[in-house]
Amino acid sequence: MTKPLLEVNNLTQRFALSKGIWQELRLEGGRLVRRSRHVHAVNDVSFTVGRGEVFSIVGESGCGKSTTARTIIKLIEPRSGQIVYDGEDITAYDAKQMLPFRRRMQMVFQNPYASLNPRHTIRRILTEPMLFHKLAVDRREADDKAMLLLDKVGLRQEQADRFPHQFSGGQRQRISIARALALSPEFVIADEPVSALDVSIQAQILNLMMDLREEFNLSYLFIAHDLAVVKHISDRIAVMYLGKIVEMGPKQELFARPLHPYTQGLFASVPKLGGKSLQETSLSGDVPATPTELPIGCHFHARCPYTRPICHEQAPMMKDSGSGHYAACHILEG
Ligand SMILES: Nc1ncnc2c1ncn2[C@@H]1O[C@H](COP(=O)(O)OP(=O)(O)OP(=O)(O)O)[C@@H](O)[C@H]1O
């Protein structure tokens, strides 16, 4: 088997909440001390992304998708676990060591307006990173490359001297994609890249991303809260709930035979093709707003229609049901 481009092993991330109600009082050695509570955003997450693969992570808001992405690219330091990129363990790399990887791994964000400097022209947004990373010998070469990129993402060269606010949402996302490509990456992390766009524009951007994948031989880690968005583009999909991957497998397998009750609930809430109404969802209740205390046992037990006593006590292990289709649920253990 060929080596994966990205390997994430047992990744865990948590945030300290240090103010007001987020502190707790504890009796330690006869003294009352204040301790920060923590949000357990990512809990023991493992997956790989192969070369040329589109791997998607889906789950409801707050389940830890963005934190996983930001930790992989080391925008935040992992609490524990391992990140291996192209065979190199980058987990403990500092900012200087990360510099070449920051070029090779690019990120496209949900809100293109917030991620583009409003005071810079598109020309400057595209050429500056190239010059910084020495991917162009001079301004003229960077400029030529920028013009080519505008063509590739479906914008006109005459638009290069405009500012981000002079573009529509979809066009701004095209600029973000061009900026990511300006650094000739091999891996793109796309964090909800179409969620802020009109449905009619979403398909255009997804198609563009898939065309660029072919042309530039890209691998994608694609993050979305909506299974419908990842249906057409993914090779494999991981479903995340409360910081954990609960199911993972090839797209066809996952869509044909969702195993985990949470995945089944997500499917039930996908709008029917061509239909106006949503099907009745079998997902009741909400994800805890701030997961400072993780449930004991299966994280999903409070919302699961099939809960058994064991689900309150033991966390289920990921089990392979064949063809690389994994799920973590006690029901599947018989
Ligand atoms: N900097 C932070 N400080 C404290 N808590 C945080 C921080 N960033 C994220 N969180 C919390 O971590 C959890 C996971 O957040 P994350 O943004 O990764 O989820 P998500 O699945 O990407 O959701 P969304 O789609 O809404 O962004 C949430 O409970 C969130 O409130």
Image (cartoon, helix red, strand yellow):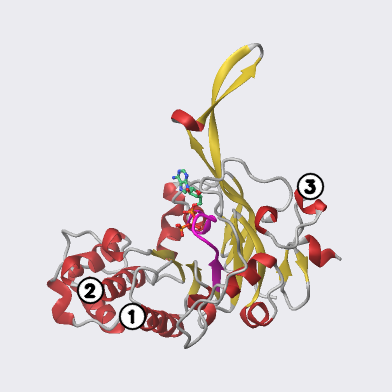
Residue count near mark 3 (Cα–Cα under 10 Å), binned few <14, some 14–19, many ≥20: few
Residue 230, position in %: x, y? 51, 76
Q: Which mark is residue 313?
A: 3
Q: Earlier in the sequence, mark 2 or mark 1?
A: 2
The kind of residue on which mark 1 rests is: Ile
Disc 1/disc 3 C-alpha distance (Å): 46 Å
Q: CA distance from mark 2 to mark 1?
A: 10 Å
Q: Is residue 334 left or right of residue 207?
A: right
Mark 2 Cβ inside 8 Å of ligand 1: no
Q: Are marks 2 and 1 in contact (CB under 8 Å)?
A: yes
Label 1 CA crowd tier, 10 Å (few <14, some 14–19, many 20+): some
Q: Residues within 10 Å of mark 2 (few under 14, many from 20)?
A: few
Quarter of the N terminus within the rendering: bottom right
- Which label is found at residue 168? 2
Magenta stretch: give its range.
55-67
Q: Amino acid at mark 3?
A: Glu
The percent position of residue 11, horizontal first and vertical second, equals: 61, 52
Q: Amino acid at mark 2?
A: Ser
Residue 76 coordinates in the image, percent (x, y) = 47, 48
Q: Marks 3/2: CA distance? A: 51 Å
Q: Earlier in the sequence, mark 3 or mark 2?
A: 2
Residue 49 visible from this viewpoint? no
Q: Which residue is mark 1?
A: 201
